[in-house]
Structure formats: C-alpha cells, structure tokens
Amino acid sequence: MSINYVSSGPGNPSILSVTFPPPPPDSEIVRQKVREFHRQIHESEGFYVGPWPLECNYYGAGITPYDSNDEKAIAAAKFAVEASDYNKDGRGHLEYKRIVRINMLWTEGLLFYITLQASDQCFYEAKVLEGFDSTHKLEMFRPAQHYKE
C-alpha cells in the first residue's frame, strides 16, 4: 500500500510517497511462529527472545534483540549497575564488566532488557528505560534468573 502526500508551499509542490510492507500472510505457520515468539517473551520476562519471526518487521513488533556493542546499550548497562541497590546499601561496589545479552522494546523511549556481568563475576538482569531526552531510569536490577551459561 502506498500513500502520497502533496505539499504545495512556495515554489514547486513536493510529493512524498510512503510505501508500507504488505501484511503477513494469514496462515497456521505464521500464527505458530508468533505464538512461539510470545511464549519466549512470557517465559523469559523479555530477557531471552529471538528475532521477530516474520519476514516483514513492523514498528512495535515487540521485544527484539539489540546490538550489545551499541553505545546506547553500554550506557544503559553501566547506568543499571551504578544505580543499583547493590551500590547503595553496603553490599559492596559493583562495576559494569560486559553485556551478555540485550533486548529492546519501543515504548515511551527505549526499554532495554539487559543481562550483564559485573565486577563480582556474577550475572544480573536489569530493565532500563532510556527516555527520548536520553535520560535513564532503572526499572529493575536483580541477580540473573534466566541466564544460562
């Protein structure tokens, strides 16, 4: 499906054409793939989810894998460790070591589902919301429950 927008401002009119991908075919195979995707989200609380199972990638398709080397991902993981209660309540001082896995959901910004390793060699899961203004909010930080070495 295509939509053409015509703007007739000063000078020559401009035309913007937007083409949307076709909807996915309605079949039992597609429904099974989508059900499996949603099962992964439910069972892992969003931390261990494969890629969106359909060939076309719709905005808002759900939680999807994210590049663990991306600077936004690293900034969110470092923020999670620094903002965690582990660094506030006398349990010791954790430092970020590496991202093991990261998923992302478009919401009122980017919601990152991060599995990370800290300086104590333990693994943690964190949810960090990066707002549109690039501020971070720690939604959750806990010892990893879904990480499988």
Image (spheres, rainbow, N blue to C red):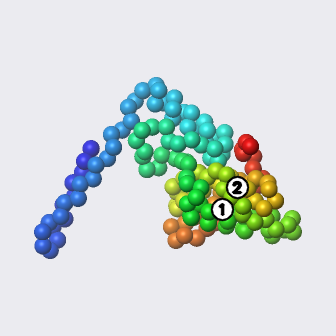
Decide: is 61 above or below 4. above
Q: Which mark is residue 115?
A: none
Residue underneath mark 2: 116
Q: Mark 2 falls on what kind of element? A: strand
Is disc 1 in contact with disc 2, using a CB cutoff of under 8 Å? yes
Instruction: Specify the quadrant that holds the C terminus.
Output: top right
Number of labels in the image equals: 2
Horizontal and vertical percent for residue 120?
81, 59
Residue underneath mark 1: 77
Which residue is at the front of the view, 141 or 116? 116
Horizontal and vertical percent for residue 63?
55, 48
Dividing the picture into quadrants, the one containing residue 117 is bottom right
| Amino acid on which disc 2 is placed | Leu
Whether residue 129 is visible to the viewer of this picture, yes or no, is no
Q: Earlier in the sequence, mark 1 or mark 2?
A: 1
Q: Residue furthest left?
A: 12
Q: Mark 1 falls on what kind of element? A: helix
| Amino acid on which disc 1 is placed | Ala
Horizontal and vertical percent for residue 45?
66, 45
Please tell me which residue is depicted at 48% across the width and 30% down the height of the picture: 31
Please tell me which residue is depicted at 40% across the width and 41% down the height of the picture: 56
Decide: is 10 above or below 30. below
Decide: is 72 above or below 32. below
Horizontal and vertical percent for residue 132?
51, 67
Whole-number angstrom distance, CA of label 1 to CA of label 2? 7 Å
**Left or right, 88 with reference to 106:** right
- Crowdedness of circle 1 by 10 Å Cα count: few (<14), some, many (20+)? many
